Amino acid sequence: MPEPEILQQLYRETWLKVYAPQMIAGQEQGNLLRMVSHMIRPKYILEIGTFTGYSAICLSYGLLENGKLHTVELNRELDEIAGRYFLLSGFSDRIVQHFGDARNIIPGFDIIFDLVYIDAAKELYIDFYELSLQKLRKGGFILADNVLWYGKVSNPKVKNDKDTAAIRKFNDYISQDERVENIILPFRDGIMLIRKK
């Protein structure tokens, strides 16, 4: 399906102005996030890793009318671009921005989330997962991005890469966690879909 014009503009500006622009979700992944959000129809979404706001906007399309998306970003320098596009997208009244370490922010939420999207520091994925699971409703979903990590997770020759090691550890951790069900979608850089039992 076509990419909304506002997301096209955000994608272009990110590539023109932001360091490491390849971290943006982009059209294919954005369409998947939109579709999943529409399927779940969440009232509350937690996003860990805002970056420039592309994925938050995509996820907001499926929110219930009175729903909210809480997005957490460590890098305060990304505030201006993300906030501006939240306003332009028409979702600024549904998106709440938080800045700081998600490990300190998540415990303070007095909210039970329906959907969580994790796309931040790879070495902290297990921490983010455990904190999110405590705030997720039974039957709720977690989406974890980059679980194939450019194919490195299945390449035995990749040994001294801390992010690859962290993602391998996370994948193994989830596969052995009896509190959830999971599947890896081989889509873009790999998205793990996790359902809390």
Image: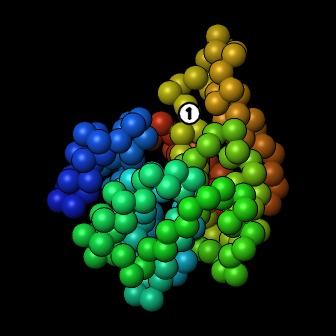
Q: What quarter of the picture does the N terminus occupy?
A: bottom left
Residue under the point 57% across and 53% down: 74
74 left or right of 6 in image? right
Residue 182 at x, y percent in the picture: 66, 52
6 left or right of 123 in image? left
Above-or-below relation of 56 to 135: above
Residue under the point 28% across and 76% down: 90
Given residues 137 and 165, the one toward you in this image is 165
Above-or-below relation of 158 to 136: above
Name the kind of residue labelled 1 in the image: Leu
Residue under the point 30% across and 65% down: 84
Above-or-below relation of 1 to 20: below
Residue 148 at x, y percent in the picture: 56, 33
Name the residue beneath numbered marker 1.
148
122 left or right of 30 in image? right
Residue 121 at x, y percent in the picture: 62, 43
